[in-house]
Amino acid sequence: MNGKTILVTGGAGYIGSHTALALIKNGYDVVIFDNLECGHIETVDTLKNLSSYRGRIIDFIKGDLKNPEEVSSVFIRYKIDTVVHFAAYISVEESVKNPQKYYENNIVGSMNLFSEMIKHDVNKIVFSSTAAVYGEPKSSEALQENHEKYPINPYGWSKFMVEQILSDYSKINKIKSAVLRYFNVAGANSEAIIGEWHNPETHLIPNILRATNGKTFQLFGNDFDTKDGTCVRDYVNVEDLADAHLLALDYLESGGISDCFNIGTNEGNTVKEIFDICERVLEQKINVKICERREGDPAFLVACNNKAQKILGWTPKRSIEDSILSAYKWQAKLAEKK
Ligand SMILES: NC(=O)c1ccc[n+]([C@@H]2O[C@H](COP(=O)([O-])OP(=O)(O)OC[C@H]3O[C@@H](n4cnc5c(N)ncnc54)[C@H](O)[C@@H]3O)[C@@H](O)[C@H]2O)c1
C-alpha cells in the first residue's frame, strides 16, 4: 500500500477509469468524483469489484464540479493527496455549437475544484489537456510543447484557459500542476475489463470498428496534403496514457515544478492506414464512404514526446495494432451488455 489517496474527477469516463485502474494496481487508494453525465456507473462498479490489487476505489461520489458544495464535500470527507482531473466535456463539434456549455463546465468546474483544493491545502494536480490547444500546426513537424498555442474551437480554448489558470496559480505557489496534452487516445484495457464508451462516439477507431457489422464508415476528406490524402494523427494507447499519469504523480511528489508535457508517440498514421490496419487485424472488409472534409480538421497532428520521455521517463509501449485489437475486444463485450 503506498497510502496515498488520489481524487480522480471524471473517473467514470474513458481515460479516467483506465487511470483509476492503473492507480489501484500501483497501490493508490482512489476516490472517484463524476456526475455520470457522460460516464457510466457500470464502469465504477467494475473498478470497485477488483479486489486483487494493492489499492482500491474507496468511494464513488456522484457530484458535479459546477456545484461548489458537492466538490467541497469530497475534501471534507477525505484527506486527498493529489487530484487527477479528467472531468470535462470533450466534443469539439458540440463546443462550436454551444460554447457556453463548454466554458461553464470545463472552466468554471475546474475553478471550483481549484478553489476547494486551495481551501483544503491540496496543492498538486495532474490535468488532462489536449493537442487542441495548439490549433492549426505551423508545419508538418512533430509538435513541441513550445509551439504556438492558438486553439481553433471553444473546446481547445477551454482547455488552454485552464492551463493558463493553473500556470498563474503555480506562480503564487497555490497549486503545482503537471499538464498532460494528450493526442488521439485509443484502445481499451487489454483484458477488456473497461474500455471506451462514448455516446455519441466521435473517435476514429471505435467508429471504424462499429462499421464491421455491415454498416458504412464515413471517411472525412481524402484531399489533404499527406501521403495518401487523409489526415495524419498520433494515436496513443490508453493504458500507456494511464502510465503517464502515474509518472506525473511521481514527478510532482518528488519536487518537480509545474510543467506541460505532450503525450503522444512521435509517430503519425493516416486515417487510411488506420482503416487498413483495422481490416487486417480483424481479417474483415469494412465498407467505407469518402465524404467532404470537416471544417477545422488540420492535415497533420503529431506529438514530439521527447520532453515527457526525458523529464517524466515515459515512453509509449503499445503499438497501434494493440490499441485496435483491445478496442475491438472491448466493443464486442460492450455489444453483449446492450
Ligand atoms: N479522449 C481523447 O481522445 C482525449 C484527447 C485529449 C484530451 N482528452 C481529455 O481527457 C479527459 C477525459 O476524456 P474522456 O475521453 O475520458 O472523456 P469522457 O467523457 O469519457 O470522461 C469525462 C468524464 O467526466 C465527467 N464529467 C464531465 N463534466 C463533469 C462535471 N462537471 N462534474 C463531474 N463530472 C463531470 C463525465 O461524466 C465523464 O465520466 C477530458 O478532460 C478530455 O478533454 C481526451
Image (tube, rainbow, N blue to C red):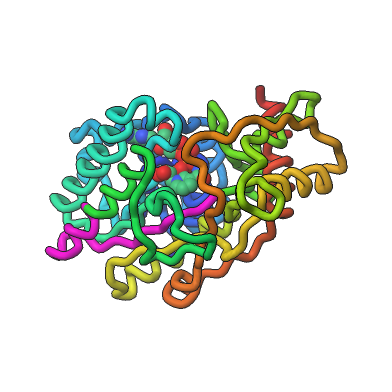
Question: Which residue sits furthest bottom?
Answer: 310
Q: Nearer the viewer, residue 300 or 216?
A: 300
Q: Is 120 on the left-hand or right-hand side of 243?
A: left
Q: Is 56 on the left-hand or right-hand side of 74?
A: right
Q: Looking at the image, which residue is at 27% across and 60% down?
A: 124
Q: Which residues are magenta?
A: 165-184
Q: How many marks?
A: 0
Q: Is 256 on the left-hand or right-hand side of 119?
A: right
Please provide percent x and percent y for residue 246.
45, 63
Quarter occupied by residue 3: bottom left
The relative height of residue 279 versus residue 309 in the rendered view (above or below) is above
Residue 33 is a magenta residue: no
Quarter occupied by residue 122: bottom left
* Quadrant of the frame with the C terminus: top right
- The answer to whether residue 274 of the structure is visible from this angle is yes
* Quadrant of the frame with the N terminus: bottom left
The relative height of residue 224 versus residue 23 in the rendered view (above or below) is above
Q: Looking at the image, which residue is at 72% across and 36% down?
A: 209
Q: Nearer the viewer, residue 59 or 244?
A: 244
Q: Looking at the image, which residue is at 57% across and 65% down?
A: 266
